[in-house]
Image (cartoon, coloured by chain):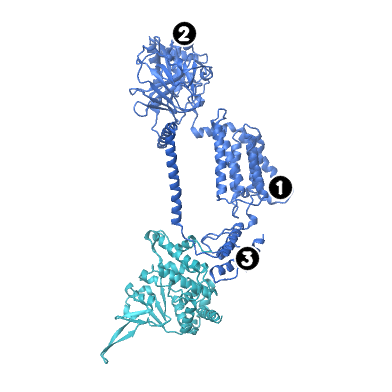
Chain colours: A blue, B cyan
Amino acid sequence: MNEQPPVHESSIQRAPLTVFIAAFVALAALFVTTKNGIMVPVAVAMLGSLFIKARLDGDGNFVRLGRYAVFGFILWQAYDYVTSPTAESPEMVLAYTIGYLCALEMAIQTWIRRPASGARSPATILLSAMVFLAASNTLNQSYIRFFTPLYFLFLSLSWRAFQPAVFQSRTFWKRGAVLAGVLGLSAMLHGGVWHYRNEISNWGMQFIEGRSIESTGLSTDPYLSSSFNIRGSTTRMLRLENADSNGQEFYLRVAAFCDYEANRWLPQINHETGQIITPGQVQAPEASRPLKQPTLRITRLTGDQQLVFAPLNAAGFLFSPDTQIQWSAPLGPLQTTMPDGTTEVTYEIQLSQQEDYQGFYCKPPDADLLARYRQVSKDIDPRVRELARTIGASAKTDAERISAVGAHLLANHHYSLKSRFRMPERTSEFLLNKRDAHCEYFASGGAILLRCLGVPCRYVIGYVAHESDGANALVVRGRDAHAWIECWIDNHWVTADFTPGDGRPEGRAQPLPLKVKISEWFQKAGSYLRVQIERLRKMPLRHWLVIFAGLILILLWSARNPRRKKERRDVFTYASRDAELSLLASRFEKWLQRQNAPCPPGLTWPEHLRRAGLEQAQPFAARYEAARFGRAESLHELHNLLQELERKP
Amino acid sequence: MNTEVDFKNAVERIEENLGRVIRGKNESIRLLLISLLAGGHTLLEDVPGTGKTTLAKSLARSMDGTFRRVQFTPDLLPADITGSSYYRPQDGDFEFRPGPVFANILLADEINRTSPRTQSALLEVMSENQVTVEGEARLLPQPFFVIATQNPIEFHGTYPLPEAQLDRFTLRVALGYPDLSHEVEVIFSQNVGHPFDALQPVLTCAEMLCLQKQIKNVHCERAVVEYMVRLCEWTRREPRIKLAVSPRGSLALHRTCQARARILGRDYVSPDDVQALAVPVLAHRIALDTKAKYGGARSANLIVEALEKVEVPR
């Protein structure tokens, strides 16, 4: 049996004061960053534990339930906050939430009874470090600059292992010098971190996801690159039903851009104030036109993009009546929202039986617009025009020019996600220096070259749907984001994609990892459940009553069952002792608990007292055993002995 | 009161006598005495040269009863222990010549050096205090006490004792190596002559029987008996144990606890007695599951585990 160290009451309850101060600094930092009053009672609770001796039982139901309740409340609040319309960035809320949770845990820890080994200090330091980390989440808040040196100071003071011998010194000046030194060092450390924060954060980003594609992107909003990163996000974005694509991939466009300036395709369509319209205005395809049946049905699975995705030859849209649609004059339906904020939005697209049908997105441009589609930005290097002339020298028609440009790009460039550019104008550098780059450059470079040759074209972004998801259904993931161009030839808009095959989403797609498959299975099961629950909600009352009665029966049955089991398992109780002895025994057990040394079930009292170093109680234990197991003895003396024990502090 | 003084006195006398020969092993001597007072038999198990035989002989000499010693060798036969009938030509009849078991103290030295066939000759002797030879049961003298010594079974030239035989030993006592100062004392004390030679009997057989009778009057509360039985029952439910403690084991635990309480001057058994004696009384009675045995489990550790897990009556 293990020897237990003796427990002394005086050394049980408190962590070193410096730990407390470090914790308070962390709490204060969190308070000023989040401006949330929840930190004040937490700090008061911690402070109170310095003055009040009573402690809670760490394994007790009270502490456990309290912890669940408080943590649950905080998580609920955080969830509410994140999902509210005025929410800040969710990462920040996550950081704060972790800070709150750690702060509360810290307060709970200070109130829990512990053995003399004093395991609390490192736990409190760790928790306060987490709180501080959460507070420093917004380093741009300048108060943190003042807190950080203080925090480091108290942290280093509280960590005994780090205490230099000078701290033991009683000389006031020496102590002062050390304090000033630690303060200065931590200020320097913090200053360094602050000064190089951008570099540090860039290193971190590179470490986490390699070179960020955002830094070399060419598209403006609507911006698909957040899902289209180097690792290829497998988040499901869209689901297409009735997509009879005959093995062909669908180009689902979301927006086309007209002007190129300063490494960006403009305009920023998201910020263009569209006109809010009712669905009736969209669903008016000419009746005489032969349409495909059934209509293509698209379900948007995530809520972060509210864009409308459709193929170029869409002939009409069928939105559900409660959808709000933002209508952009040149582009057609652009954004949809549901009044109740539902993330999953489903709409149907009518497709013409003619493959080259020109629908919503293919209105003939007027002369003004046509001129803009031919315009080459002033930023573009003049040598690009010469290059274009060389490429298009032998081409006579626009179609031949397009294929010449495509052939040139395919022959001279490779697909790569790790583009490196030195010239300020990146598309020019891509074309002139034959850089390797990703789809945005192939599309952008192709568009610029074609414009140089006089072919009107526009830059388009969207998704390429290629991954089958059951019969006649396709699924679109974040990694399927793509960019291509549309050219105006012979009074028709034609899609042209110059990206090499291994760079197109269908060529680059990797098989899904098992964990993604599993999580998707659960998501599907969840949405199935939601549908079923929705159906249940519409059930008549009498069905509900039957289900309710059934549940009650099951509950009653299950409540009876464990009780029976318990009775079967642990029926044994020792032969009874007389009532007065029982009372004395329970009083003595309480006394042991107050000494912070409850007796384990496998030890007799004399043995336990010997191990716990509570020799003063041995006479009582010996007398008690004589009364309990020996022949009758007067209990008077036992009472006296116990009273004496209880009276002593 | 008078009987108590007698008891204390007698126990102290024997302990002092034995302590002169076996140095620094008061715990083992106490256990041996408990076994003797409880009317049981003792198995002394340890490596060679730790004083097992000397202790047994000293105990025999401390009492004035008859003492026989059997050196268990591989060629020993059951009849060499129990005795057998001889044909007497002058009478034309058979005469029974009692074997060495007909004594008050029987020292079965190196009991595991003989085959299980001969070891089994002791089964009836030890549990029923009688010998049946040629259909006739013969009672043994009282008190009857077997002290067997054995080397641990992993040693060369040994046969493991059958479980039934092990179960008949009330206690298994290990002596262990003496500590440094005691070993030095042992060497000096044997410089001129063996202290064993100077031993005198300090107790008569009649006195021993009287002491054994007194033990039975020690009170054992029902809760304590329940505790003993729960310990034994724990071994029956434990999957690592192939052969658990028998009711003979719980009986032995009860009787030895009474003896311990009496030696400590109490007239009641407390759970402390049970905890102190559980390992020596119970550990040799259990056989471990093969998987547990080769997984490093030891029977004594399992009994300790039982003590930790079974709730103590308070």
In the displayed orientation, state which residue is furthest to the right: A172
Q: Would residue B46 appear left or right of A627 to someone viewing this image?
A: left
Question: Can you give x and y, in whole percent of width and height, for residue A595 in the image?
Answer: 61, 58
Look at the image and tell me whether residue B4 can be seen.
Answer: yes
Residue type for callout 1: Arg
Count residues near mark 1 (Cα–Cα under 10 Å), then give few for <14, some for 14-19, many for 20+. Answer: some
Count residues near mark 3 (Cα–Cα under 10 Å), then give few for <14, some for 14-19, many for 20+. Answer: some
Residue type for callout 2: Asp
Residue ID for mark 3: A639
Badge 1 element: helix
Whichever of labels 3 and 2 marks the residue nearer the N terminus, that label is 2
Q: Chain of mark 3?
A: A
Asked if the residue under mark 2 is in contact with the one under mark 3, i.e. CB atoms within 8 Å, the reply is: no
Residue ID for mark 1: A175
In the displayed orientation, state which residue is furthest to the bottom: B90
Q: Is residue B35 or residue A442 the one in the foreground?
A: B35
Asked if the residue under mark 1 is in contact with the one under mark 3, i.e. CB atoms within 8 Å, the reply is: no
- For the residues beneath circles 3 and 2, the answer to whether they share a chain is yes
Cα–Cα gap, marks 3 and 1: 54 Å
Q: How many marks?
A: 3
Badge nearest the viewer, 1 or 2: 2
Whichever of labels 1 and 2 marks the residue nearer the N terminus, that label is 1
Question: Can you give x and y, in whole percent of width and height, for residue A216 in the image?
Answer: 50, 24
Count residues near mark 2 (Cα–Cα under 10 Å), then give few for <14, some for 14-19, many for 20+. Answer: few
Badge 2 element: loop
Q: Which quarter of the figure has residue A310?
A: top left
Residue ID for mark 2: A366
